[in-house]
Structures are given as structure tokens and as C-alpha cells.
Amino acid sequence: MTDNARPPGVAAPLIMKDTAEAATERDQVAAGSLPPRYGAAWQQPFLDRVSTALRPGVRILDVGSGARPVVPPESRPRGCHYAGLDVSGAELDRAGPAAYDECIVADIGQASAQLQARFDLVVSWQVLEHVASMRAALDAQRLALADGGRMVAMLSGALGVYAVLARVVPYRMSTAIQERLLGVDGADKFPTRYDSCRASRLSELLTQGGWRSHEIATLYKGGGYFRFSPTLQRLYPKAPTTRAGKCYCAFPKRDYGRSSGLRPGYLRGLIEGAANSGRHVLDVGRGEA
């Protein structure tokens, strides 16, 4: 069904927009120069988790959203309240007047009574690797959730080759290199800290923080960082993997007497390590303190 044919009040599906980079990787998969996992949209597992929480009247806090909200207005359910939180008011303004129902200029690393128990869903896309304290950021997001709430986040892991280089190479030089070799827009790059951005450490913090349950999924798709060199890009996915990369997490709020810890088998395919960078997707439920 096209957007024009969609019935009034029916939200558009939450699907990752295709890019020239994704199309190129699919071609490389078809040619056998990249593993099959590169043929899938790496953002989609995160969006699929978010989609399951999009019910009528849901209250959503988009952390670090800035100019690009995770859930665009056309994909929001009826009666949804969508708040954007960012340390930069200018970034929120870049999204346009229709992007948010509420704009909050604040640091997610600092708990705020203004946010307490106001939201059913907290989402963040490639934000948590930038915070100074992961513990403080997780605690603040848990505080913002109402009973039964959930957090879904995607973040970069601390041991991916790009993450190691980011901590060694000065920020301005790193940004210039990415602009030159990868064609990224330096205006969209912000300093990264990678505090506790490891699956084992994230699991510890979530357990200690009183979240109801958590799952961490890992995506191995770091070869894109080497697209400036076809030879390196072919060799990179074949290198030995370790526990590093990007992580996707979703967290529910209320404690129902069950805690699902990190299952080692669930990590396979979600984190690419020092040689193979990946992304972590977190799916977490908030528990009682």
C-alpha cells in the first residue's frame, strides 16, 4: 500500500530508508565479496523492536534525537505523545516544528524530576556511546518510564576497531578522516566516550539497576567502515570476532518476578569485535527499585 492509499489514522510502517551504501553492500553480498549478513538493513532489528511498542496513546521519549526522530510523525500511532530530548536545542530545532509534540533540552546523564514516570517507551539511536556515565544515563531513562514501560536503544560497542581508533585519534582529526574516506557529514558526528559499552558490562548495570529484564543483540556489520578500500573490506569480516561492537537493547520497567540475563548464544551475530565492529541492540524492561 502506498502512502497515498493508506487509510486516515493508519500509521506508516517503521522501515529503514534505503541508502546507496546499503544497495552497494547488497551487490557485494550477491557477488560473494561480503558475508550474507551484510545484505540485511542493520537498523531494522532496532526499528522492529520499537514498532512492537507503538500502540495508540503511547508516550515516547526520544533520547538524543536531535534533527532526526527515531519514529517520524507519519509512523506514530493515534494519540501518541512524542517528546524529543537533546543537550542541544539547536539540534531539536533542525527537525522542524512538526517533529515533536514536546522538546526537552537536557542531558540524559542527569536525572530530572521533569521526566519522572512520564513515558511508556524510551528510544535512543546511536546515543549511549556518547554519554559520560552509562550508569547515570540508564538510571535517568529508568526514572522517566512509567510502570510497565520499556527502553529500546542501539549503541556502538567499545571494542570495535572504529571505537578503539576514536579513543586514540583526536576528535577533529577523526571527524576529518571520516569525511574524507567515508563521505560522512562532520556536522552529524559528536564526541564518543564508550563508557561501559560492552555486553557484559551493560548486563551488569541493567541487573544492578533493577530493570525487570534485558536482552542484548549484536549486529556484525563493521565492514562498511572500510569501504574506502575494497581489499580491507573483504578481509575485515573474516577476522576473528571478540565481544565488541554495537548493541541493541530494549528494557521493560516493572518487576514481574523474572529476570532474563544475557545469553551467550544471543550475542553471536550482534557484536563484532576488535577486528569486526558491530552494534548492540538493547531491549529492557524497567523494574521496581
Image (tube, rainbow, N blue to C red):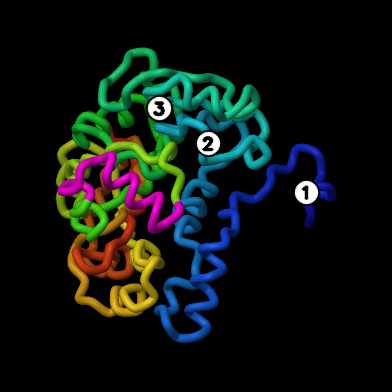
Task: Specify start and end residues of the magenta stretch as a single range.
Answer: 166-183
Q: Nearer the viewer, residue 276 or 139?
A: 276
Foreground mark, 1 or 3, reads: 1
Disc 2 marks a residue whose amino acid type is Pro
Up-down: is 224 above or below 111? below
Disc 1 marks a residue whose amino acid type is Asp
- The residue indicated by pointer 3 is 146
Foreground mark, 3 or 2, reads: 2
- Across and down, in percent, residue 116 comes to 36, 19
Split into 4 quadrants, where in the image is the N terminus?
bottom right
Disc 3 marks a residue whose amino acid type is Ala
User: Which numbered disc flags the more N-terminal residue, 1 or 3?
Assistant: 1
Q: Secondary structure at mark 3?
A: strand
Residue 69 numbered mark, or none: 2
What's the residue at 57%, 59% (across, down)? 19
- The residue indicated by pointer 1 is 3
User: Which numbered disc flags the more N-terminal residue, 3 or 2?
Assistant: 2
Q: Secondary structure at mark 2?
A: loop
- Across and down, in percent, residue 242 comes to 18, 67
> Residue 125's quadrant in the figure?
top left
Q: Residues within 10 Å of mark 3 (few under 14, many from 20)?
A: many
